[in-house]
Amino acid sequence: MPSQLIKIESTPDLVDQVYRNLLDAISEGSLAPGARITQEEIAAQLAVSRQPVLQALRLLKKDGFVLDAPGRGVLVAPLDVASLVQIYQVRSALDALAARLAAQARARLDPRLVSQGREAARGSDVKAMMAADARFHAAIYEASGNPLIAQSAQLHWHHIRRAMGAVLQLSTMRESIWDEHEAIAEAIAAGDADKAEALIREHGEEAGHNLARLLSSALAQPAASTAP
């Protein structure tokens, strides 16, 4: 079991805290695909009773992050590359609409979003990288003036976050992502809706292609290593 899980204080929303703690571990890869999770082990590590752990695991199963395991406990679900690429396609379309609307409003995104993102990209904290990316895209959704965009994007965010966690551990292109983000922010501020939409759509499509390539390669490695 991972050592990254953090002991939780007893509060009324324990189920949500356990859920988010486990989801963080799955997204960051410390709970890898195929890892077995049992109520007893998680409850002991987080210093909580088994009941909130059971409820959190049920939510994770419903959301597609864990599967029933033979015997006791559950298994972390494998990464489904085809489904994740489809999710990125939807996100790219939402981002394109948000960027166009934000550019029409000549919105100016906080420049600290990019500087903080670059700082995170130079480090080794995958969780910080994902948080920086989420803040940047959320700022565009807010600037669009259409709250339905953020609500729609949120439906798939946890799966995107998991894919990002896997890719960021493998990718060597972390800094260039923020070059793209900066260009998108500049196009939005300039009111160039066509350019902003084209840049963010290309950004999303490229992210989907990189996701498929890196994950397919990573998932194929164990099989290749066992070949005679």
Image: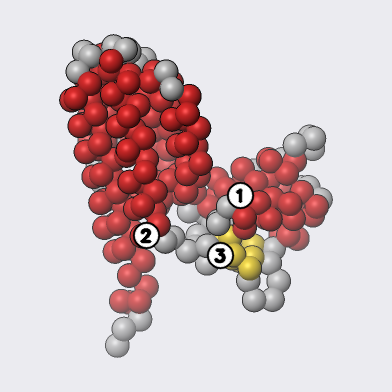
Q: Residue at x 25, y 51 (%)?
A: 209
Secondary structure under tag 3 reads loop
The amino acid pointed to by label 1 is Leu
Residue 90's label in the rendered image is: none
Foreground: disc 1 or disc 2: 2
Would residue 3 be seen by someone viewing this image from the given angle?
Answer: no
The amino acid pointed to by label 3 is Ala
Q: Residues within 10 Å of mark 2 (few under 14, many from 20)?
A: some
Q: CA distance from mark 1 to mark 3?
A: 12 Å
Tag 3 residue: 35
**Is 175 placed above or below 166 here?**
above
Q: CA distance from mark 1 to mark 2?
A: 21 Å
Foreground: disc 3 or disc 2: 2
Q: Earlier in the sequence, mark 3 or mark 2?
A: 3
**Is 25 placed above or below 14 here?**
below
Tag 2 residue: 81
Q: Could you tell me which quadrant the N terminus lies in? A: bottom right
Q: Residue at x 45, y 37 (%)?
A: 153
Q: Position of residue 212 (x, y in %)?
A: 30, 56
The quadrant holding residue 83 is bottom left
Residue 22's label in the rendered image is: 1
Q: Residue at x 55, y 45 (%)?
A: 24
The quadrant holding residue 109 is top left
Q: Residue at x 48, y 24 (%)?
A: 147
